[in-house]
Amino acid sequence: MHNVMLLAQLFLVCLMIGFMAFGGGYAMIPLVHDFIVDRFGWMNTQAFTDVIAIAGMAPGPIAVNSATLIGYHQAGLLGAIVAVIGMVLPSLLLAWIIAFMVRRFGDKQHQWMQSAFDGLKPAITGLIIYSALVMAINNGLTQPWGSQSSSQMLIFLVSFLALLFLRIHPVLIILASGLVGIVLYS
């Protein structure tokens, strides 16, 4: 019975996150953190940060990857399946509704939808920046300069500059950062 309740909680939490997660995976990180760490205590902040890091590196959407990892952490394979269904169902329903509206009303709704997206863009950008700051704080990047935090800040800055100015592919930056981590922290 306990396992059924846990599965139901996983489904409902992921369903709520899926309905509220406008802006994609990185914008939803604060919301997921609130549910998983603060409200339910299913993970501590460090474990959650590790899940987000793994979910971000793995192929596919970070929302689905994080739901898979959180569900598996809580209830094994069945938990992963239930969490993913809960996370994906709202997007699927919304896509069907939008497709129906576009098909039914055509261009009449186009301006209204474009206006809504124009209003959402700055809020989503703010959510992504907030997520980055929370992850930086949780990973000790804002702590007084110690040997590990200063080297992590250097990795962050080099990665950021390589993305911004050199346009190096993110996968290469992830691989290089992992190798540097092995060398520095092993």
Image (tube, helix red, strand yellow):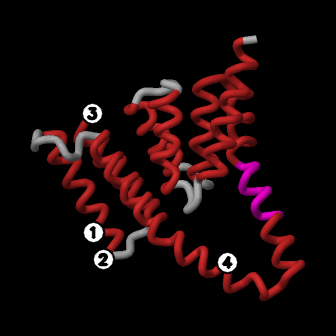
Of labels 2 and 3, earlier in sequence is 2
The CA distance from mark 4 to mark 3 is 51 Å
Identity, as a three-letter code, of the amino acid under mark 2: Phe
- Check if mark 1's residue and mark 2's residue have beta carbons within 8 Å: yes
In percent of width and height, residue 88 lies at 72, 49
Please, what secondary structure does the residue beneath circle 3 have? loop
Residue placed under numbered mark 4 in the picture: 113
Looking at the rendering, in which quadrant would you find the N terminus? top right
Query: Which dot marks residue 186?
Result: 3
Of helix, strand and loop, which one carries label 1?
helix
Q: Nearer the viewer, mark 2 or mark 4?
A: 4
Residue 89: say if magenta: yes
Could you tell me how far apart the alpha carbons at marks 3 and 1 are, in whole angstroms?
A: 25 Å
Q: Residue visible at 67% across and 21% down? A: 6
Identified at 24% across, 40% down, the residue is 140
Horizontal side, residue 103 vs residue 114: left or right: right
Q: Please report whichever mark, 1 or 4, sits nearer to the chain's N-terminal start.
A: 4
How far apart, in angstroms, are the residues tagged by discs 2 and 3?
30 Å
The kind of secondary structure the magenta stretch mainly shows is helix
Which residue in the protein does label 2 denote? 165
Q: CA distance from mark 1 to mark 4?
A: 35 Å
User: Nearer the viewer's eye, disc 4 or disc 3?
Assistant: 4
Estimate the x, y position of residue 101 in percent, counting from the top left: 83, 74
Magenta region: 88-96
Q: Amino acid at mark 3?
A: Ser
For label 3, the crowd category at 10 Å Cα-Cα, with few meaning under 14, some 14 to 19 and many 20 or more, is few
